[in-house]
Amino acid sequence: MTAYVALLRGINVGRNKQVAMADLRDVVASIGHGDVGTHLRSGNVIFTSKRRDGKAIAAELERRLADRLDLSSRVIVRSRTELEAVVRNNPLPDAAATPAKLHVVFLDHEPPATAVRDFDTERYAPDEVRFAGREIYAWYPNGFATSKLNDAAWKSLGVTATARNWNTVTKLLALATDLEKQ
């Protein structure tokens, strides 16, 4: 069995898209995935599956969430192995010392090379950005709340994105690792 993490975009933020974690776990289990758990209340689901195609798992979860919970939310899935590589390959290791200010932005697909090349990182200073395939590492030295480096910036790349801070990313990896050890 492979352990996966599903990251739902934009749920339980403010009053929008409120979802009970028990309902979310039930939907994921109803598809046939096992050992389903959630972390925090922001759309982080950990589970095991015999399936091997993260994009197909994400698409099925989106359909089931719409059908069962009347919830329209994009879902991004990473295997434990992929998540481990995200942590291992962090291009901003010094930023990990302030884990609430280091975010990983998970993308549904790698942005076009031209979009990455044309992305004006200086525009967002003092925030720092590093592109790495289907992830973007963003460090917000003054915090995320006042940053211009937000969802609009990622949309300009033509991708669906959802971010998690470094604390959450490393905790999700630990939870997924524990599942694969069972």
Image (cartoon, grey):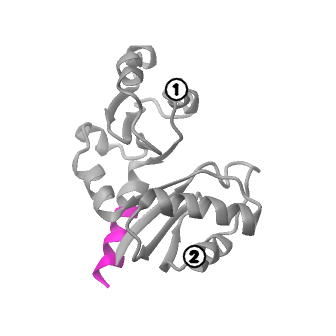
Give the x, y percent position of residue 35.
46, 81
| Residue 172 forms part of the magenta stretch | yes
| Residue 5 forms part of the magenta stretch | no
Q: Please, what is the three-letter code of the amino acid marked with disc 1?
A: Ala
Give the label on residue 167, or none.
none
Q: Earlier in the sequence, mark 2 or mark 1?
A: 2
Left or right: 133, with 143 as reference point:
left
Give the x, y percent position of residue 164.
47, 48
Query: Which residue bears the numbered disc 2?
Result: 31
Image vertical order of residue 166 relative to residue 111, above or below:
below
Q: Is residue 175 visible?
A: no
Quadrant location of residue 138? top left
Query: In what quadrant of the picture does the N terminus appear?
Result: bottom left
* Residues shaded magenta: 171-182
Image vertical order of residue 140 relative to residue 51, above or below:
above
For the point 39% across and 19% down, which residue is it? 121
